[in-house]
Amino acid sequence: MQQVQAIVARRQGEPVELVTINVPDPGPGEAVVAVQACGVCHTDLHYREGGINDEFPFLLGHEAAGVVEAVGPDVTSVAPGDFVVLNWRAVCGQCRACERGEPQYCFATHNATQRMTLADGPDAGAELSPALGIGAFAEKTLVAAGQCTKVDPAARPAAVGLLGCGVMAGLGAAINTGGVTRGKSVAVIGCGGVGVAAIAGSALAGAHTIIAVDIDAKKLEKAKALGATHTVDSSQTDPVAAIQELTGGFGADVVIEAVGRPETYRQAFYARDLAGTVVLVGVPTPDMTIPDIPLIDVFGRGGSLKSSWYGDCLPSRDFPMLVDLYRQGRLDLDAFVTEEIALRDVEAAFAKMHDGNVLRSVVVL
Ligand SMILES: NC(=O)c1ccc[n+]([C@@H]2O[C@H](COP(=O)([O-])OP(=O)(O)OC[C@H]3O[C@@H](n4cnc5c(N)ncnc54)[C@H](O)[C@@H]3O)[C@@H](O)[C@H]2O)c1
Ligand SMILES: [Zn+2]
Ligand SMILES: [Zn+2]
């Protein structure tokens, strides 16, 4: 067991705190990772606000890269010294999805068995709930060995750590879920970290027309820099009509919704061409319902309506490949890192999420 500094959300809605936590030595199937970088994702804020569940205290942070420090006695997939990106899809190999050869949908993913705990204060010894089973706003964290994906150690941790969540979700929404290929037309509604990654993924896949839609003009600039061929400010223009106009009057082959709201889902639904695909990667809240869409429109327009969890990624397949593309200069992951900050700045980074200038603040240790 060792003690390290970490960012914890103790109670719902209260500012996060920098505290000392206990990290157990790795047991069977586990690894301790010295974290080098961890991005600040909206989901961390959702945890703090009690929007995910009420299993406080949470150890936040989950978009991370670092170096394996120690592994449990039976672990062979990684070794001390390996540079890894942490994932929240350590596949089991045995569930019905894994057995039919679709581990990207694994229904029984692994996390560490032992729990990290609070070291000080009145609640010393309380078990921490790590965000998405990772908890990487910490100098060191305990994870399942399968959550460690080895990648090229020459890569910049702050950039490639982002593949651990939001950027992978966006890239994969386009490439894996949406099936974007050379020559297709794509529209992306919502150009935060996830939407811009969907744009970068569409460009990487060779899409012909890539339309970025947002209500914030600053976000559209970033989208352009990462591959959007056209932009639509939907606070000024009807996005459905604009997307149709930019695609010969028809609509886009693939429309990716990266906001997670009924009104933008409706726009995505009507902005796609006949037989097109809608991908929902934005996460709605439990109270939201799909607005009035006539069933005949669902039937009559054909195509498919899909949802994308973590970009339908398989970390062992996708992370090393995307890091290689980054190292070759074909995928600009650096563009997602708006600022590098310290652990103690996480609360301030939450406040900056809404000002439109930040794609990702990344804690660097
Ligand atoms: N499916 C997954 O596995 C997965 C993983 C990570 C994040 N997400 C989700 O993806 C969504 C986007 O995440 P993010 O980090 O990019 O968030 P973000 O807040 O950085 O970006 C959201 C963007 O949507 C824009 N927007 C808001 N309302 C809009 C509207 N009505 N029309 C058009 N644009 C609008 C905002 O201006 C902003 O640019 C969130 O719902 C997040 O929870 C999903
Ligand atoms: Zn499985
Ligand atoms: Zn995330």
Image: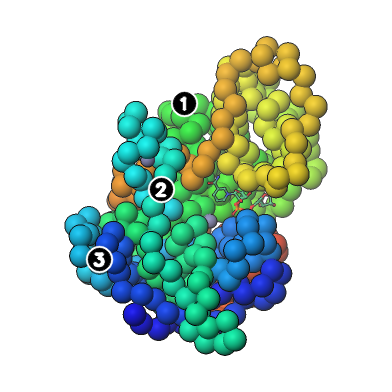
Q: Mark 1 is on which residue type?
A: Gly
Q: Is residue 13 left or right of residue 280?
A: right
Name the residue: 48% across, 54% down. 165
**Mark toward the viewer: 2 or 1:** 2
Q: Position of residue 347 (x, y in %)?
A: 63, 74
- The part of the image, by quadrant, that contains residue 297 is top right
- Calculate the distance from the C-alpha at mark 2 to the C-alpha at mark 1: 35 Å
The numbered mark at residue 324 is none
**176 vs 334: above or below:** above
Residue position marked by numbered label 3 in the rendering: 72
Please say if 85 is above or below 349: above
Query: Which mark sits nearer the N-terminus, 2 or 3?
Result: 3
* Dot placed on the residue nearer the N-terminal end, 2 or 1: 2
Q: Earlier in the sequence, mark 1 or mark 3?
A: 3
Tell me the amino acid under the disc marked 3: Gly
Q: Which residue is mark 1?
A: 183
Query: Which residue is depicted at the point 32% across and 39% down?
Result: 94
Residue that mark 2 sits on? 109
Q: Residues within 10 Å of mark 1 (few under 14, many from 20)?
A: few
Seen at 57% across and 82% down, the residue is 123
Residue 177 location (% of width, % of height):
48, 33
Alpha-carbon distance for marks 1 and 3?
A: 47 Å
Q: Residue 266: give x, y in percent of width and height.
A: 73, 32
